[in-house]
Every structure is written in structure tokens, then in C-alpha cells.
Amino acid sequence: MTKYKIAVIPGDGIGPEVTASACEVLQAVGRKSGHAFSFTEVMAGGIAIDTCGEPLPKDTLRTARESDAVLLGAVGGPNWDNLPGDARPEAALLGLRKGLGLFANLRLAVLFPELKEASPLRPDLVKDGVDILIVRELTGGIYFGKRGREKKREKLDDGTPKGVEAFDVECYCEAEIERILRVGFNSAMQRRKRLTVVDKANILETSRLWRQVTEKVKTEYPEVDVDFMYVDNASMQLLRRPKDFDVIVTSNMFGDILSDEAGMITGSIGMLPSASLGTPGTPGMYEPVHGSAPDIAGQGIANPLATILSAAMMLRYSLGLPREGAKIEEAVENVLAKGFRTADIVEKKGDAFLGTKEITEKVISEYEKL
């Protein structure tokens, strides 16, 4: 029997509810597979600010580093909106990514056949389903570049004083680009062998370097069909022909935007899991794409399926249990096929739905049948 150590960061809002559901499913996996999971709960985000005075306590990062994987709920909420950037709950996310060396974010945007009516796109555009993996560079680019403000003496062409000028610098090196590209290529090899590199190479020097490095790396993956697409065109094509995309690899900022757009195509952000990975042997972090949803926290109606599917990604990518991960995904699909829904994915207002606890029990029941 193998024992796996999981650091659980429930966070804020509905985070504690959905992470509890995922842990229940993992316990069911343990009972059936003979493996054991131990969970250590630690704080980050708004609750850590209120309790410890900082968004990411040192003990949390230490526990995460000593674990096999990290399961995160959600952080943030209106209670902390007026704090400065480095003191906000979201700073915990950047700190965890940096502290764990998580440079690759994998977001799955899968439209389950049972939920195609929930997609905002025309039925003919999603009739064959959508299955996109967005690989986003996570620790470089404009989000981690030099930033600041300074008072300028210069004036605009019309004579208006410039006043305060703010700047955020986009910077990438070859090594950062190459390692995220390899994650994209390796992922494509396990899927439909199509890779789209999204950039803005007609304007940005960093994007031109992305293309140059891609041309070098792609020679090692002759089976993968590679194309390049400007980010503005990619945002349009995701809406026009989403089924044509397989793996998208892109920079930190572009990936942040496109992954949310792709998520909306699936009909509910409450269904989307994600994985943040570093070098082999380091713990990955797994979290739903959705936010903390404080307006429904504590009501028992949050959709836990994205977090449960994130746990399935954890089994596959960090714990070396791909079969068990696939069975969780199959269990979720079976639950949906039988017509069970949470409030956010009912076909029309007024339809019956299950709460967080009830839908979790359905997933466990389906898993135990497999």
C-alpha cells in the first residue's frame, strides 16, 4: 500500500465545501485501490490574512513543499478587495506558484455531451463536443516582470502633462519558453497531436522569441502538427471552431485570458479543473478554475465537480495513478448522463438540482461501480 500526503488549502468562500468533496472522493479511491491518502489542512488567502495577517503563511508553503501534491479550493472575496496588491488573497497564488516552482498550468476545457445545451455557442458548433487543453506559462512574463509608477515631467503632443506613468514589463528567456513548450508537445503526443502556439509576434519581441524556440523544439516532435496564431485571432477562432483545437500553449497573460474564454464555451466554469506543475518530483497544485463564490458559500449548493476533476488530474500527473484518475472522470460523466445536476448546470431555471453533498455521493457511488 502506498501512502500519499496531500496538502489541502480550502481557502475562502466555497473553497472549504468543494475541497471536502474532493477529499471524500479520494478516500473512496483509497478504499477501492488499496492506496492511502493523508490530508493536512493549511491556510492561504483571505482566511490567512484574517488569522495570520498575511495571505501565505510560511507554514503553509513548508507543508506544501513536503507533500506529494496540493489541493486548493479558492481564494479571495469582497472582504479583501481594498487591500494593496501584495497583501490581497490572490498574492497567495503567486507565492505558491513561485515557491513550488510551478511553471506550467494545464486547464482542461471539456464540454460534456450531456451539457451541450449549457454552452452559449450555437448547437452546430459544439455538436461534436469540445476538448481543449490550454498549457499556460505560469511564472514568467508580464505578471512577474518589473513594474512600478513614476511621475513624468514630459507632456503629450497636445501639451497635456503626462502625470503619473505606470509600467509592467513582459520578459521571457529561451529556457522558460522551451520548458513550457515541452509540456505542450508532450501533452499533444498523448492527445490528438495538434499544437497551437498563441502569441502576438507581429508586435511583441517576446512573441518572436517564442516562435523561434518553437521552430527548434518542434523538430523533436515530428508527429505533432504545429501552427501559430495571433492571440486576437485565437480568441475569435475559439468561438467559431472550438472543436478544431487540441492543445494550446501560450504565455502567462494570454493563457490567463484564453483559458477563461475556453471555459465559458463549456457552459459552466464550475466544471473546469486545472493542474499547475513544476519539474518532475516536485508537488503539483490542483484547483478548480472557478472563484470563491462568496454569495453562495455555506448554502450547500456549490458545484464540486471541478474540484473532483482536479483531484483526478492529481492522481494522473502527481501520484502516478492514471487509471484511478480516469475512473473518477468516468464516474462524473456517468452522473451527468443520468441527469443529475447542480444548480449552476440545470438546463432551465426551476429544474430540480442536487446540493454539494448529494452530487458528491452520486460520484462516489458511480466510482465504486467501475
Image (cartoon, grey):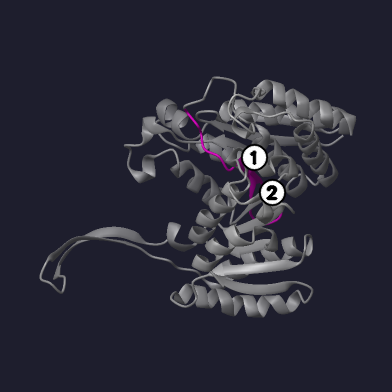
Q: Is residue 44 left or right of residue 53?
A: right
Q: Amino acid at mark 1?
A: Met
Q: Quadrant of the C terminus?
A: top right
Q: Is residue 261 above or below residue 207?
A: above
Q: Quadrant of residue 135?
A: bottom right
Query: Looking at the image, is 230 positioned above or below residue 88?
Result: below
The reply to whether dot 1 and dot 2 touch (C-beta < 8 Å) is yes
Q: Which residue is mark 1?
A: 271
Image check: 350 left or right of 218? Answer: left
**Element type at marker 2?**
strand
Q: Earlier in the sequence, mark 1 or mark 2?
A: 2
| Residue 122 x %, y % | 62, 51
Q: Which residues are magenta?
A: 271-294
**Would you say 69 lies left or right of 365 here?**
left
Q: Residue at x 72, y 79 (%)?
A: 219
Residue at screen point 60% across, 61% down? 240
Give coordinates of residue 177: x percent, y percent.
58, 69
Is residue 183 at least partly visible in the picture?
A: no
* Disc number for residue 110: 2
Calculate the distance from the C-alpha at mark 1 to the C-alpha at mark 2. Answer: 8 Å
Q: Nearer the viewer, residue 231 or 206?
A: 231
Rendered view: 191 above or below 112: below
Q: Residues within 10 Å of mark 1 (few under 14, many from 20)?
A: many
